[in-house]
Image (cartoon, helix red, strand yellow):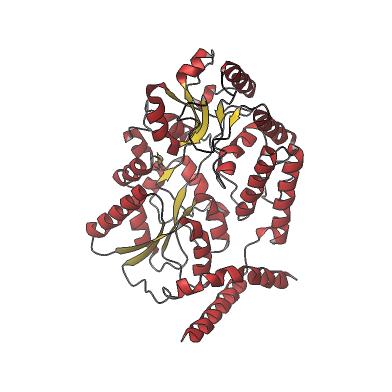
Amino acid sequence: MVRAKTIFKFWRRLSVLILLLLYLSGCSNQSNGDGTIRVWVHAGTQEERQIITEQVQGFNASQDKITVNFTFIPEGSYNAQIQAASLSGDLPDVLEFDGPFVYNYVWQRKLIPIDNLLSEEVQQELLPSLIQQGIYKQERLYSVGTFDSGLGMFGYRSQLQAAGVRIPTSYEDAWTAQEFNQILATLAEKDSKDRQVLDLKLNYRGEWFTYAFSPIIQSAGGDLINRSNYTSAEGVLNNEQAVAVMEQLQSWLEKGYVDPNTDDSAFTEKRVALSWGGHWNYRNYLKAAGDDLVVLPLPNFGNSSKTGQGSWNWGITTNCKNPQAAMRFLEFLLQTEQVLAMSNANGAVPATQSAIASSKLYGEGAPLHLFSSQLSAGQSVPRPQTPAYPVITSAFQQAFADIRHGLNVKTALDKAVITIDQDIEDNEGYRDPDPEEISCQKSLFQFINCLLMTNKT
């Protein structure tokens, strides 16, 4: 029965993978070679691409034993290409990937532990959030990032003061849930236009909703899954506290407090006094608000203010023949100068304490110090450390959409729990895969690749 399920799931996914086969087959004969490291990088912003290009060139020029060859991979197809490359045996030596996916990659045996490769000195320098995100089975570290993300709220100080609103100065004195609901009501009453005073970035899609709003569930006393064993979301995602906090969010929508923000300009055009957002919003918001801009923690819904964490991370694949050389490249990226270069390019929170201390945005007294202090103090919650995460986030995103459009909150969360628990059951609790199953899948994939290549000739 177990083997039948495995074969069925493999064939179900194979149709997607074959679409990528011709692309990958042209790369399958590339050689790692001694001293050569193949790296895949997500094709982020132009600024990020420029910095990583300069960093690779700088690393290659700094020594003559290791050469890094890198390839930019489009974000939209990134995960699918990793899956296909894994089955065809063509994974690069080093991968960049969205942090929460590390657990699924480890489960599929795509990544090796790096805690014995990364120096203790560098590990001590890293933000706790990055260490926490990169740890999986048996407390081993599998990934590391050069930056993390910041999540909170932005506000117009003058509008808040005019409404008599207390302005928090750190996560320790964040607004309570009661305060926040009263603040929204007061701001709406003073709004002479449409009572829309809050931007939740409803124009965003996908992972934003899990990243941005699971912290309020965790602050209230719920979670996306039971983290004691990761076998069920029942009683945590749909418990009384989770339902109550999402009912509050639904009430903000029903009372008309939330700007739909279809043009992504609700805050910059001063249509709202408050915007739920991340570090990437800061530059545009500063242009719009100037000295009137204030950065705020998310409200405390009962168990202190919580925030999100996680961004693009690096890992070393099971294909890598020279992990020590790969780690030399990663440790180069984690030097203070290099961390700051990337942080200055994308505005994200620097990965190391020394870089934070030197940062004009995130150091003590700097405009975004709140974001770095939240991560350093452990106020952030990593997304669930389980291979089931892709299904968990998809189910929560659907629940958020249902709640947004008026579905009963308990019903929406119950649906998400059913989806999550069914996936975990279908995957037999995400037990560690049998090496023979992995070998069988790779062999079959390579056989099909051979047939397709023969047909092409």
- Judge from the rendering whether residue 63 lies leftward or rightward of residue 373; answer left or right: left
Residue 148, position as x, y percentages in the image: 45, 42
- Judge from the rendering whether residue 323 lies leftward or rightward of residue 61; answer left or right: right
Image quadrant where residue 16 sits: bottom right
Residue situated in front as seen by the camera: 113 or 52? 52
- State the residue at coordinates (72%, 35%): 243
Residue 12, position as x, y percentages in the image: 65, 69
Relative to 218, does residue 73 appear above or below in the rendering? below
For the N terminus, the image quarter is: bottom right
Residue 44, position as x, y percentages in the image: 41, 51
Extreme front residue here?
193
Number of dots carrying numbers: 0
Residue 229, position as x, y percentages in the image: 67, 49
Residue situated in front as seen by the camera: 332 or 224? 224
Q: Is residue 227 visible?
A: no
- State the residue at coordinates (51%, 18%): 160
Residue situated in front as seen by the camera: 313 or 243? 243
Image quadrant where residue 138 sits: bottom right
- Judge from the rendering whether residue 339 lies leftward or rightward of residue 312; answer left or right: left
Q: Is residue 425 visible?
A: yes
- State the residue at coordinates (61%, 34%): 216
Residue situated in front as seen by the camera: 191 or 445? 191
- State the residue at coordinates (64%, 36%): 217
Relative to 197, does residue 243 appear above or below in the rendering? below
